[in-house]
Image (cartoon, rainbow, N blue to C red):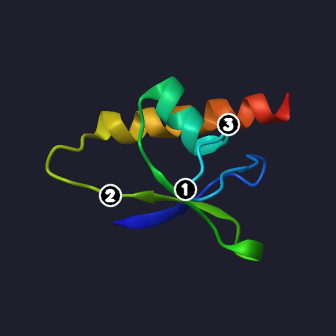
Amino acid sequence: MCMVQLPPALPMNDVPGMPSSGVRSALRDRYGIEAALGNFGDSGNFIRLSHAVYSTTADFERLRDAVLELTEEAQA
């Protein structure tokens, strides 16, 4: 398991325990990806990656592509 910093240009409006229109909801609803997110103040926003025997390279590539797409949309 590890934490990976999200792009600074990706705004995270997520509130723990509250469904929202934030990054976590977009990942779940639009891309079928369930992920834990965290805000660490000045250090930035992070996503937790958990690798298991059933995880594939394609899973992590799909997450990467989803984060990049959400970041591009936020900048538009």
**Residue 17: mark in rendering:** 1
Residue matched to label 2: 50
Q: Secondary structure at mark 3?
A: loop
Q: Secondary structure at mark 1?
A: loop
Q: Is residue 33 left or right of residue 30?
A: left
Image quadrant of residue 26?
top right
Amino acid of disc 1: Gly
| Sequence-wise first label, 3 or 2 | 3
Residue at position x 75%, y 55% from top?
A: 8
Q: Are marks 1 and 2 in contact (CB under 8 Å)?
A: no
In the figure, 38 relative to 69: above or below? Answer: below
Residue at position x 42%, y 36% from top?
A: 33
The one nearer the camera, 61 or 43, is 43
**Residue 21: mark in rendering:** 3
Q: CA distance from mark 3 to mark 2?
A: 23 Å
Image quadrant of residue 24?
top right
